[in-house]
Image (cartoon, grey):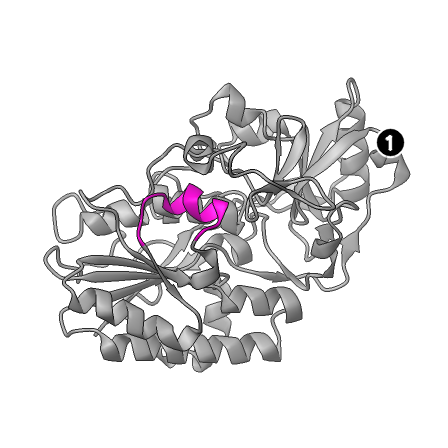
Amino acid sequence: MVNEPMAQPSTAQPDGRSEPQPVLPDYTGACIANLIPALVARGTAAAPAWLPGALKAEHPVVVLVVDGLGWLQLQDRGHLAPNLMGGTGVGQPITSVAPTTTAAALTSLTTGVSPSTHGILGYRMAVDDEIMNVLHWTAGLCPPRDLRRERPPAIFQPFEPLGFNPDPIPVVSRHEFSATGFTAAHLGRSPIVGYRTPSALPIEISRLVAAQVPFVYAYIDGLDKVAHAYGLGEHYEAELAATDHLIGQIIDRLPANATLVVTADHGQVEVGNSVEFLGASIMSGLSFLSGEGRFRWLHARPGATDDLVAEAKERYGTTTWVRTRSEVVDAGWFGDSWTTDVISRLGDVLLAPHAPMAFADPSDVGENRLVGRHGSLTAEEVLVPLITLQA
């Protein structure tokens, strides 16, 4: 069992207010970016101490990523997840990456490198003076422009996903994701076995293991979708119970020597209607916005950065980490390996709330309807489970 990553002690502000410190990703240790390399080294001297010791090199492993399953949300609702809470790895959180959003986190999970290295720095990212929607691999509106030819995923994100064996690791994921740009960017040459309904997920996983595939990667996104639509109440709890039941079905279909490893890309915070629209005095200093509601980048007009920082701290300093680009880069939020092209995708000033709120982008109206959110560096969003379940 590893020590749970914790925020640093609160620091006093000049006006006497206390600001909690962010929970930083553990890029050199128990982080999703290091999970697949650790599992490849399972049962050997190269396996890290934070990896559960019961894993053996010769036994098949299935990694199941439950999108949106935060460690703290699971602990609060453990009675709804008897399969997950009965795992040999329960009690072991690991960290996600920055920002705690699917695009950055899944790319780190599959490639084994930090966001500063692979360059996928969020859901809506500034690239060449326009905003790229990474999950859709598009830019612009009405209609959005498909970027798969203009920005080929294998060139834009050059690190070979899941490239730790001579052959790519097979992936079990939703059928409709098979041909997307983001799938190509974070899964590369990996063969995709698509399922059309969640009930087919255990079947496809068990077929691969029965065919002597030693390592399988699987993904399910229902919990994240429900959290976005309804928050963390009854609907979320019902979906967690359904996901746990599905996990039980996966375990029942696996051979006795197989291990199911469950993790996630990020946790969740219920924001509801606490969405802040930036005032005219801040918007007048901006060229545009990027990022997501809980990791909002302000792209300043020339000469406006200092004024933006000062006003943002005055308005939001009690609820939000207000940081300049250089501050988050120097603090290692994204990792420590940068190229000029990748670092240019960041804005000038970051607003990352530690309170349950989000910052709106008028050009991304769909996001404003989300009830559950993620992206910032609170414990609720950063800590994800590492749970091993024996068949």
Magenta segment includes 385? no
Q: What residue range appears in magenta?
A: 179-191
Image check: 312 left or right of 382? right
Q: Quadrant of residue 298?
A: top right
Image quadrant holding the C terminus, namely bottom left
Magenta segment includes 185? yes
Q: Position of residue 153 (x, y in %)?
A: 46, 37
Image check: 18 left or right of 197? right
Q: Residue at x 34, y 42 (%)?
A: 161
Relative to 296, is 91 above or below?
below
Q: Position of residue 76 (x, y in %)?
A: 50, 72
What amino acid is labelled 1 in the image? Ser
Identify which residue, 121 or 82, lies in the foreground. 121
Q: Residue at x 54, y 25 (%)?
A: 343
Residue furthest left in the image: 58
Residue assigned mark 1: 284
Image quadrant holding the N terminus, namely bottom left
Relative to 305, is 132 above or below?
below
Q: Quadrant of residue 337?
A: top left
Identify which residue, 339 or 83, lies in the foreground. 339
Identify which residue, 225 or 173, lies in the foreground. 173
